Amino acid sequence: MSKLSLKTLERKNLPYGKFKFMVLFKREAHRVWRCDSNAGLIEEMRGMLRTTCRGSFKLVYEVNSRGRRVYTHLYLTEAMDLALIKLTHSEKMFKIYKIKVCQTDESV
């Protein structure tokens, strides 16, 4: 199975209350503290999301040891936005998740 195929992630609630899809970005190292900044690669994607996104989106970043941004996650609400991003910027993605809300049995 490809890494860019849609996987299901079960959570108690949606991230930030509304996002249904999560995209993990590629980066050089697993630990963000040691990783180089990928802000230059994400800049073109940010511009496209601002102009063509039907739903809402959220880019999440952390700061590395040099004080620069390393983008780690992209949250989306619409499946069409995800398809557009996957077609145009698939080389920048690592994994894609569809977030499913699972109901826990609290009656026990």
Image (tube, rainbow, N blue to C red):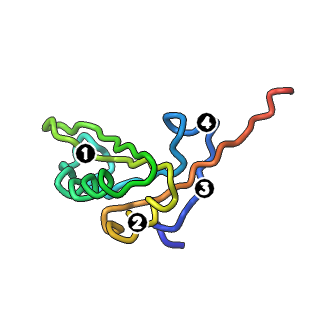
SS at mark 3 in the image? strand
Q: Which mark, residue 84?
A: 2
Lower sequence index among marks 2 and 3: 3
Query: In front: mark 2 or mark 3?
Result: 2
Q: Which mark is residue 8?
A: 3
| Image position of 12 (left or right of 96) | right
Query: Of callouts 3 and 4, which one flags the residue occurring earlier in the amino acid sequence?
Result: 3
Which comes sooner in the sequence, label 1 or label 4? 4
- Tell me where residue 82 appears, x and y as whole percent: 45, 60
Which is more foreground, mark 3 or mark 4?
4
Residue 24 percent across, percent down from the top left: 40, 53
Residue assigned mark 1: 70
Eye-nearest disc, 1 or 2: 2
Q: Secondary structure at mark 2?
A: helix
Quarter holding the N terminus is bottom right
Q: Earlier in the sequence, mark 3 or mark 1?
A: 3
Q: Within 10 angstroms of label 4, few (less than 14), some, or many (20 or more) residues? A: some
For residue 13, the mark is: 4
Whole-angstrom CA distance, mark 1 to mark 2, is 22 Å
Q: Name the residue located 58 percent from the left edge and 49 percent from the top edge.
A: 99
| Quadrant in the picture for residue 59 | top left
The amino acid beneath tag 1 is Val
Q: Earlier in the sequence, mark 4 or mark 2?
A: 4
Q: Amino acid at mark 4?
A: Asn
